[in-house]
Image (cartoon, rainbow, N blue to C red):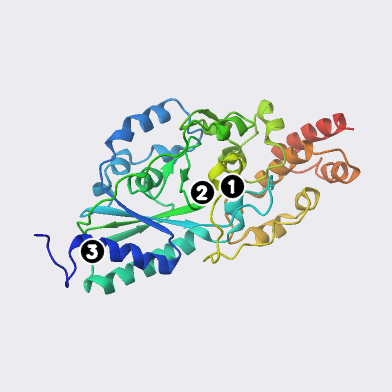
C-alpha cells in the first residue's frame, strides 16, 4: 500500500500537483525519473566533436548534469513544466519570438516559486525542492521528453502536440516519490522540413545541431567575426532564429493562446534595421534592459545588424546607415560594415 500524505496516495498527489500547475500558466506538466544514462554518451560525443562551439559552460559539471541527485541531493523525481509563449508576430522577423517576451527567465522562476507554495498547501508539509528555469547544469529538454511533456524534434527542440515548440521549460527537483510519466510518442515521422529549411545547414542530421553554424548561436553566443561563408545565409536575422520552428507543421497547427503570463515587448517589433543600427549605446542599453537581447553586447548588436543590412535589398537609407558606422571605434564593427557595404553595392 502506498504511503498516504493527508489522504493522498502518490498517484493522486501527482495528479493534483499537475492540475495545480495550470493556475500558473504551465500548460503541460510531467514527472521524470533521474536516469539520464541513455543520453550521456551522445552528449559527451557532441561536446568532444566541438559542436557546442564556444559555449564552454556546457562542459561544466558533467556528473551533476547527468546525475540530478548530485546537483540537488534528496531529489527523488523531477517535475518538468512547459509554458508556451506567443508565436512570431510575422514570419522571418529579424528577432526571434522568444526575445519579444521580457524577463522570461525571471518570470518563469517566479511562477515556479508560486507553484511550490501551492504544492506545499496541497501536501500540508514542506518538501525538499529546488527550482530551475534555464539555469544550472540541467538537461531540461531530455527531462521534458522523459516526463511526456513533449518529444524532441529533429531540430533538437521539444515539441508538444498542442503548442508546438514555442515554449519555455522549468523544473522542480523534489524529494517526493511521485510516479513518473511515460515519454510521449514522437510524431515527427518522416518529416524533414526543419532540416531542409535551415539556411546554414546547422542541423547536420536528425537530432544533431552544429551550434557553430546555427544562426541563433552566431547572433547571440558567438563572439568575434561571423564566418564569411555563413553571413549571406543569415539573411535579416539579428538576434536568434525561428526558421526551423516556422517550418515545423506542429507550429502551424499550434493551439491559440487565449491567455498568457507573458506580455510581449514592443520595443523591437516595428523599427527598420537602419533605425536599430543607428541607436546609440545608451539607447540600446535602455531598450534592451529586461529583454533577452540584453545578453549581447552593443558591439555584437551592431555586428549582427551590419550583416543583416548587407543581406538586404539596396537602398540609399541602408547605405547611409552603414556609412555612418564606417569609422566606428570597434574593429569588429568596421569589418562587418565594410563587408555589408560591398555586398549592398552588388545588390544595386
Residue 200 position by quadrant: top right
Mark 2 secondary-structure assignment: loop
Q: Locate the N terminus and report the quarter of the image it occupies.
A: bottom left
Q: Is residue 10 above or below residue 299?
A: below
Pointer 2: residues within 10 angstroms few (<14), some, or many (20+)? Answer: many
Determine contact: label 1, label 2, CB under 8 Å. yes
Using the numbered discs, state the Cα–Cα distance from disc 1 to disc 2 in whole angstroms: 8 Å
Residue 311 position by quadrant: top right
Nearest the viewer among 50 and 37 is 37
Using the numbered discs, state the Cα–Cα distance from disc 2 to disc 3 in whole angstroms: 28 Å
Horizontal placement of 115 versus 162: left or right?
Answer: left
Residue at figure coordinates x 41%, y 52% from the top left: 135
Residue 241 at least partly seen: no
Mark 3 secondary-structure assignment: helix
Horizontal placement of 189 versus 77: left or right?
Answer: right
Residue 37 at least partly seen: yes
In percent of width and height, residue 332 lies at 69, 37
Using the numbered discs, state the Cα–Cα distance from disc 1 to disc 3 in whole angstroms: 35 Å
The residue labelled by disc 3 is: 12
Q: Is residue 25 above or below residue 295?
A: below
For residue 252, which numbered disc appears in the image? 1
Nearest to N terminus: mark 2 or mark 3? 3
Mark 1 secondary-structure assignment: helix
Nearest the viewer among 111 and 253 is 253
In percent of width and height, residue 223 lies at 59, 38
Pointer 1: residues within 10 angstroms few (<14), some, or many (20+)? Answer: few
Nearest the viewer among 33 and 215 is 33
For residue 164, which numbered disc appears in the image? 2
Residue at figure coordinates x 82%, y 42% from the top left: 322
In percent of width and height, residue 126 lies at 23, 69
Amino acid at each position: 500500500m502506498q504511503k498516504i500524505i493527508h489522504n493522498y496516495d502518490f498517484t493522486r498527489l501527482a495528479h493534483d500537483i499537475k492540475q495545480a500547475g495550470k493556475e500558473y500558466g504551465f500548460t503541460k506538466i510531467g514527472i521524470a525519473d533521474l536516469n539520464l544514462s541513455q543520453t550521456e554518451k551522445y552528449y559527451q560525443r557532441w561536446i568532444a566533436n566541438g559542436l557546442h562551439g564556444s559555449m564552454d559552460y556546457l562542459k561544466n559539471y558533467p556528473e551533476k548534469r547527468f546525475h540530478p541527485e548530485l546537483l540537488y541531493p534528496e531529489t527523488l523525481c523531477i517535475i518538468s513544466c512547459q509554458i508556451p509563449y506567443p508565436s512570431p508576430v510575422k514570419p522571418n522577423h529579424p528577432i526571434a519570438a522568444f526575445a519579444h517576451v521580457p524577463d522570461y527567465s525571471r518570470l518563469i522562476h517566479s511562477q515556479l516559486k508560486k507553484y511550490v507554495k501551492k504544492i506545499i498547501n496541497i501536501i500540508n508539509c514542506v518538501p525538499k525542492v529546488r527550482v530551475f528555469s534555464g539555469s544550472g547544469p540541467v538537461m531540461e529538454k531530455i527531462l521534458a521528453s522523459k516526463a511526456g511533456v513533449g518529444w524532441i524534434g529533429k531540430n533538437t527542440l521539444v515539441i508538444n502536440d498542442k503548442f508546438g515548440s514555442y515554449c519555455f521549460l522549468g523544473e522542480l527537483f523534489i524529494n517526493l516519490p511521485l510516479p513518473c510519466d511515460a515519454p510521449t510518442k514522437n510524431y515527427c515521422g518522416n518529416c524533414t522540413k526543419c532540416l531542409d529549411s535551415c539556411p546554414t545547414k546547422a542541423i547536420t542530421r536528425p537530432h544533431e545541431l552544429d551550434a557553430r553554424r546555427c544562426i541563433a548561436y552566431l547572433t547571440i553566443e558567438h563572439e568575434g567575426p561571423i564566418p564569411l561563408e555563413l553571413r549571406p545565409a543569415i539573411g535579416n536575422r539579428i538576434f536568434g532564429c525561428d526558421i526551423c520552428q516556422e517550418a515545423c507543421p506542429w507550429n502551424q497547427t499550434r493551439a491559440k493562446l487565449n491567455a498568457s503570463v507573458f506580455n510581449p515587448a514592443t520595443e523591437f517589433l516595428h523599427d527598420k534595421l537602419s533605425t536599430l543600427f543607428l541607436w546609440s549605446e545608451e539607447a540600446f542599453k535602455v531598450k534592451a534592459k529586461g529583454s533577452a537581447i540584453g545578453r549581447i553586447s552593443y558591439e555584437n548588436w551592431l555586428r549582427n545588424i551590419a550583416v543583416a543590412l548587407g543581406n538586404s535589398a539596396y537602398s540609399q537609407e541602408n547605405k547611409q546607415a552603414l556609412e555612418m558606422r564606417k569609422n566606428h571605434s570597434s574593429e569588429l564593427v568596421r569589418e562587418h560594415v565594410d563587408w555589408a557595404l560591398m555586398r549592398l553595392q552588388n545588390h544595386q
